[in-house]
Image (cartoon, helix red, strand yellow):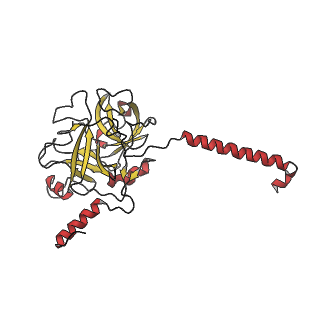
Amino acid sequence: MLLSRTSPARGGGRLRMLTSLLLLAITATINAAKTPVPPACGKPQQLNRIVGGEDSADAEWPWVVSIQKNGTHHCAGSLLTNRWVVTAAHCFKDTLNKPTQFSVLLGAWQLGNPGLRSQEVGIAWVQPHPVYSWKEGSRADIALVRLEHPIQFSERILPICLPDYSVHFPPNTDCWIAGWGSISDGVPLARPQTLQKLKVPIIDSEICGRLYWRGAGQGAITEDMLCAGYLEGERDACLGDSGGPLMCQVEDTWLLAGIISWGEGCAERNRPGVYISLSAHRPWVQRIVQGVQLRGHSRGSQPRGLRIRRQTAAAARGAPAA
């Protein structure tokens, strides 16, 4: 009925309508072009001291960030999106309501020489996990850090993936940690403070639970913790590595398996590193962080963890593994 009221100018009306639709389409295309697509997570774009660790390569771990307190390295963290970093909650004990004391340095391979392509941004706020108790060795030692403004991705600044539901990290899975922490108890990383890396195998949770057993009803290893490292000691994370990533590679993509949380001493015998599992806290992270990327096993592939469990069960029966 409304169209019939404009029937004398039907041709002009249609032209105006087509023009409006064309302008809307052009505007939508321009706006879409202004919204950058985030880069694929967990994929370093390689360019040509953790105790017992070694120097990493420039841009080898582009999601590892330095959380600075009053201008000095305090903890490490991992970049999830252009506005969010994940780290350990204990890094903000007694300073949770003082975000102005902190900043995040991204894209720095050497803290003593961060380079022109690094970026430093302030912290808007910190969201610790609601059940974290602010006690050393507490479960849920994880916090999300909201940056003051979005950062620009580059070959030195990229996000890491979270593991999806298809991923398990069975014992003896080789993973890596990275950070700028002390190279031994009481010995800081020397200038230029090159990012250190160390390969660490996942340790069976039951074995780790026995190592850290504190008496009846006082098991230190909770269901949201992973253990990784070497029972003989000598290689481990240390002071200043807190909040940094435990990274495992699945089908050529790096996943954030855990967050460096605690341990007794540094690289001591039968005292491996303890990490907060991202698989355990993935739903909480996803509720808060919009745009976090998940990766796992592609359809049709068999997760390594499932195969290992099948082999173990077959061996127990004395039958050949499938």
**Image quarter of residue 109:** top left
Q: Is residue 186 above or below residue 317?
A: above
Q: Can residue 93 be seen in this snapshot?
A: no
Q: How many marks?
A: 0
Q: Is residue 157 above or below residue 247?
A: above
Q: Is residue 218 above or below residue 124?
A: below
Identity of the residue drawn at 20% across and 35% down: 182
Identity of the residue drawn at 22% across and 56% down: 171
Q: Can residue 170 be seen in this snapshot?
A: yes
Between residues 263 and 233, which one lies in front from this camera angle? 233
Between residues 292 and 309, which one lies in front from this camera angle? 309
Q: Residue furthest right?
A: 8
| Percent x, y of residue 50 | 21, 38
Identity of the residue drawn at 33% across and 54% down: 279
Give the left or right position of residue 12, taking residue 262 as reference. right
The quadrant of the rendering that contains the C terminus is: bottom left
| Percent x, y of residue 319 | 19, 73
The quadrant of the rendering that contains the N terminus is: bottom right
Identity of the residue drawn at 32% across and 62% down: 302
| Percent x, y of residue 119 | 39, 31
Q: Is residue 238 above or below residue 278?
A: above
| Percent x, y of residue 288 | 43, 48
Between residues 238 and 37, which one lies in front from this camera angle? 37
